[in-house]
Amino acid sequence: MITRRLFCTSALASASFAAPLKAHHTNKSQSYEVPAEHEPRIVELDEYIPAGEIHVDPNFFALYLTLPDYKAWRYSVGVAGPDLWEPGEYHVQWKAKWPSWRPTNAMIKRNPAAYAKYRNGMPGGPRNPLGARALYLFQGNRDTYLRIHGTTQPWTIGTAVSNGCARLVNDHVIDLYNRTQKGARVVLHPRWRDV
């Protein structure tokens, strides 16, 4: 199990970062400059984790894609609210570019005003809540309906507002998508107060 110390240290210990991914979000009605502290960077880890795994630490709003030699890419993420976060081990069963989206039945039940109008789904594209890319998290052959995905609301990165998923700025999720292999192990770590 990954320790608190691992992520506390790695969150603070950034190494030089190879290829900057300066993200800028623009649409017809708004422009958003991603804060420098939310830009991806390579960090050092305190303990060995095999390369190619994804670890999401909701306590630091951080997603780590592990590399060889005790290093990892660190991406800033938005995560689920306290009652919707589902810690556990998963794997990437499927990857999609500009994925379509349908709110889960639980989302529609929790907030029909926001989600009922999408019960038949929404095609992929720049207005879709899953953003530019999505990694679909499974346990065995079971779709958990949890995703690591982009967002149309980049200002929510670093907050706990999603319905269970981890979200990244679209430019960053494209980079993560390109670096992640199908079948990759994914660990959604618990919140400290839940341990």
Image (cartoon, grey):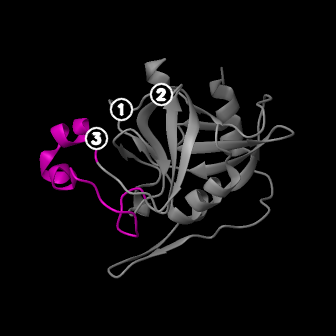
**Numbered range of the magenta stretch:** 103-130
Dot in front, 3 or 1: 3
Position of residue 91 relative to residue 11, above or below, is: above
Disc 2 marks which residue?
191
Q: Is residue 129 magenta?
A: yes
Q: Which mark is residue 4?
A: none
For mark 1, give the secondary structure: loop
Q: Which residue is drawn at 36% across and 62% down?
A: 128
How far across and how far down the image is residue 52, in percent?
A: 73, 40
For mark 3, give the secondary structure: loop
Give the distance between the C-alpha atoms of the residues marked 3 and 2, in whole angstroms.
Answer: 23 Å
Q: Residue at x 62, y 70 (%)?
A: 22
Q: Residue at x 44, y 22 (%)?
A: 193
Q: Residue at x 38, y 38 (%)?
A: 164
Q: Earlier in the sequence, mark 2 or mark 1?
A: 1
Give the distance between the C-alpha atoms of the residues marked 3 and 1, in whole angstroms.
Answer: 18 Å
Disc 1 marks which residue?
82
Number of other residues with Cα within 10 Å of mark 3, as a class: few under 14, some 14 to 19, many 20 or more:
some
Q: Which of marks 3 and 2 is nearer the N terminus?
A: 3
Q: Which residue lies furthest to the top in this view?
A: 195
Q: Which of marks 3 and 1 is nearer the N terminus?
A: 1
Disc 3 marks which residue?
104
Position of residue 119 relative to residue 171, above or below, is: above
